[in-house]
Image (spheres, grey):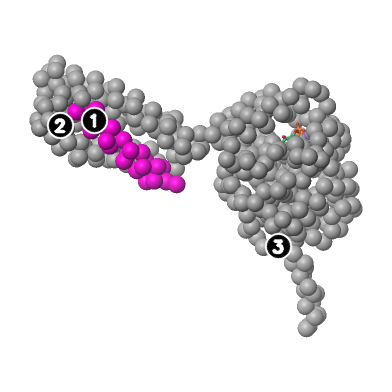
């Protein structure tokens, strides 16, 4: 992370070192066709923020002339104002915000919309609250006493907002305990607590992404009233709603507990090909149970690898196919070293049936294999 910017030392000024002013705040504003809003936004931000300690970073995916409008009016303010126009629009709103976070140089990184639904006058309050309370994250909240959804004009939108907030609070109970408005698009985060590299946003809900994935330490909230849109129209669509559901799924499946359940289900499904082949080889072609158990295991490992690799760790395939497959096969068959002697003990010693004995040894090795996949094959 880049340290705060300092004022240049004037040439010839020997012995008089000007006090370096660090950049207090970077305001990140994602824009998508907001040509009629950006001038008013800049005017109101400039009126409440110290110019020398503030930078404003627009991350733009517009198809209109929003970047040109920003550049035209930026000269009116003695403030660092930059526009980063993206050609690809990857990740939508959230992707744009993360790109802004990468270039932000301020002690605090503030994220807000361009359409003035987030009153610019609240930005100094966010930072002040964060500093006063030693917070890592300050959330601008519509759902804390003093806040309101005022500008969410129609009933339908209010209901959707309330409903999805409730859903999200239930899904991510522990991460969101102290956050009343996890779907807010207005927040400030202390740069030293921000790990943008961990964020994989998909669409609008960048704050949710940030809280669930990076678990900021101390969170405080500042109430605000959601305003009507200044000009233009909302970019939120039905497609954006579906993207949100996909985002939720991704965030939920990203938790270790969900993966353990998935791994268990896949493991259980592997019992089917395993036992079936073992049965076929021993009772139909009269093969000895030891080599039969080895072959049955190989089939089950192929089955497990296919499912694990295609579904469970689909988004975490950092190694190449051969590297993943060979490790998986090594680990998947390694337990035969213990399972075959154990099977012999159960079948020859304890006179258990081949299928029952095989099942017992499989259950015993399940936990061990899960731990190895988590820690070694698919890294952290
Ligand atoms: N760069 C970029 N790329 N910006 C985008 C994109 C995109 O794909 N999509 C939207 N934006 C910008 C808009 O230009 C605007 O500045 C801001 O993101 C919010 O977009 P709106 O379309 O105005 O969103 P909204 O009002 O429906 O939703 C806002 O309020 C919700 C709370 O009700 C957002 O802040 C949501 O995150 C928030 O949950
Ligand atoms: Mn809006």
Where's residue 62, x and y in %?
A: 75, 36
Residue 322 visible at all = no
Which of the numbered marks, if any, corresponds to residue 4?
Answer: 3
> Does the magenta segment cover residue 60?
no
Ligand 1 contact, mark 1 (Cβ < 8 Å): no
Which residue is drawn at the image coordinates 79% and 60% (left, top)?
53
Which residue is drawn at the image coordinates 29% and 25% (left, top)?
271
Q: Earlier in the sequence, mark 3 or mark 1?
A: 3
Which residue is drawn at the image coordinates 20% and 25% (left, top)?
356
Q: Is residue 328 above or below residue 355?
A: below
- The residue at which mark 1 appears reads as 360
**Which element is circle 1 on?**
helix
Query: In the image, which residues are magenta?
Result: 357-380
Where's the N terminus, which quadrant? bottom right
What is the CA distance from the residue labelled 1 to the residue labelled 2? 9 Å
- The residue at which mark 2 appears reads as 346
**Which element is circle 2 on?**
helix
What is the CA distance from the residue labelled 3 to the residue labelled 1? 60 Å
- Pointer 1 with pointer 2, Cβ within 8 A: yes
């Amino acid at each position: 992370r880049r340290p705060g910017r300092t004022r240049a030392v004037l040439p010839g000024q020997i012995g008089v070192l000007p006090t370096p002013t660090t950049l207090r705040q970077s305001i990140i504003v994602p824009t998508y066709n907001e040509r009629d809003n950006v001038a008013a936004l800049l005017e109101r931000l400039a009126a409440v923020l110290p110019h020398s300690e503030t930078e404003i970073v627009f991350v733009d995916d517009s198809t209109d002339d929003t970047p040109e409008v920003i550049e035209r009016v930026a000269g009116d303010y003695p403030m660092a104002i930059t526009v980063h126009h993206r050609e690809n629009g990857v990740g939508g709103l959230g992707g744009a915000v993360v790109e802004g976070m990468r270039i932000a140089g301020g002690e605090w990184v503030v994220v807000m919309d361009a359409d003035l639904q987030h009153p610019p006058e609240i930005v100094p309050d966010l930072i002040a609250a964060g500093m006063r309370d030693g917070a890592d994250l300050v959330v601008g909240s519509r759902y804390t006493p003093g806040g309101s959804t005022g500008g969410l004009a129609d009933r339908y939108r209010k209901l959707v907002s309330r409903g999805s907030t409730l859903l999200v609070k239930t899904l991510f109970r522990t991460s969101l305990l102290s956050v009343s408005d996890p779907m807010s698009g207005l927040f400030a985060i202390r740069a030293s607590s921000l790990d943008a590299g961990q964020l994989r946003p998909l669409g609008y809900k960048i704050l949710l992404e940030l809280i669930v994935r990076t678990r900021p330490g101390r969170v405080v909230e500042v109430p605000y009233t959601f305003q009507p849109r200044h000009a233009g129209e909302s970019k939120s669509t039905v497609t954006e709603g579906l993207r949100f559901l996909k985002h939720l799924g991704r965030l939920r499946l990203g938790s270790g507990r969900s993966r353990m359940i998935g791994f268990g289900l896949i493991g259980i499904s592997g019992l089917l090909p395993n036992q079936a082949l073992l049965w076929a080889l021993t009772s139909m072609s009269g093969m000895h149970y030891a080599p039969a158990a080895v072959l049955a295991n190989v089939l089950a490992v192929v089955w497990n690898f296919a499912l694990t690799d295609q579904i469970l760790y689909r988004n975490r395939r950092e190694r190449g196919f051969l590297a993943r497959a060979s490790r998986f096969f090594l680990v998947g068959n390694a337990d035969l070293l213990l399972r075959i002697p154990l099977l012999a003990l159960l079948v020859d010693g304890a006179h258990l049936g081949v299928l029952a004995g095989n099942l017992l040894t499989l259950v015993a090795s399940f936990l061990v294999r899960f731990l190895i996949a988590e820690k070694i094959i698919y890294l952290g």
